[in-house]
Amino acid sequence: MKIAALQMCSSMQVNENVDAIAMAAQAAASQGVSYLQTPEMSVMFAEKRTQLDEWATDENIEHTLKALADIARNNALYLHIGSMAVPSGDGRLYNRAFLFSPNGELITTYDKIHLFDADVEGDAPYRESDNYRPGEEAIVTPVGDLNLGLSICYDVRFAHLYAALREAEANVMAVPAAFTVPTGEAHWHCLLRARAIETGSFVVAAAQGGTHENGRHTYGHSLIIDPWGRILAEKAGNEPGLIIAPLDLDLIKEARMRLPTLANRREFSLSVNRHMS
């Protein structure tokens, strides 16, 4: 099974971004790809609340989801939209991923669980929780012969999420992202390789890359990694484009037999400042 990740520098122009996804899907399908992942906030890369609220109307969302479903159906592939903003019902939004089947049906959605509230040196502060409501449910869903574990960007720093996905029989971890440049340079590759190694799973991480209309800078370096932590494909730098790799399911079995971490896992107690008398 061939899979692909699309690196983007998404703008705040929805039609422009959807057109870029459509072109990438056509190119991927022509090369035999059956699963295509786009980055976090690939449909519109907005940050200000006014921009998000203007975008996230029922009419806009319905129109965009129809266009994305058409892209999946027209190219007969699984289309995984890394995320887009949708209303949560409490005045904030969800950072939500959408997965479409090759016939254009919406298979499942996933709402980002861990929200990025951080002060990054060399960049403006991030307060994702000001605008977004966290999700509460981890998702594993079949994609052909694969079991896809869904996550988004900052989730990658929380290993217990991927342990839970692995226990639920996920064997491909999806990590669409929009990493900052400072954190990307420091942690992107090592975090993604760690998630692959510790779960014995493939990792697919489509990334935003470049300078966006709102002045944000994202790291790029989209990756596909095998269960032994080897990088199968990388979009070096932050230029837009596709990366494609075949997934050999035997590598999952091999990695999990060589390092059966799930079977070896033990429960334990914890003592803090325990003094022996």
Image: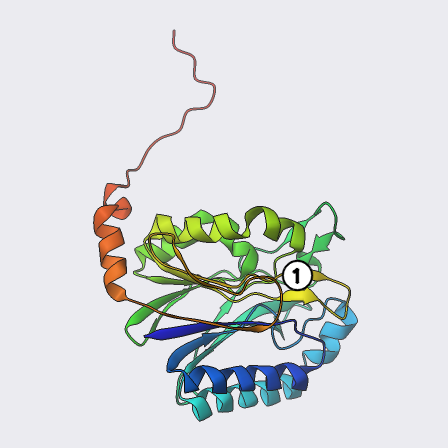
In which image quadrant can residue 208 be found?
bottom right
Q: Is residue 10 left or right of residue 231?
A: right
Q: Is residue 16 left or right of residue 161?
A: right
Label 1 neighbour load within 10 Å: few <14, some 14-19, many 20+ = many
Give x and y (percent) for residue 261. 28, 45
Give x and y (percent) for residue 40. 58, 68
SS at mark 1 in the image: strand
Question: Which residue: 38% across, 6% down?
Answer: 277
Q: Quadrant of the N terminus?
A: bottom left
| Three-letter code, disc 1 | Thr
Give x and y (percent) for residue 142. 33, 72
Question: Which residue: 63% across, 65% down?
Answer: 209
Q: Which residue is label 1 attached to?
A: 218
Question: Which residue: 48% across, 84% down?
Answer: 27
In which image quadrant can residue 247 be found?
bottom left
Snapshot colouring: rainbow
Closest to the observer, 87 or 180:
180
Give x and y (percent) for residue 115. 60, 56
Measured along the vertical axis of the image, is residue 258 above or below residue 47?
above
Closest to the observer, 169 or 136:
169
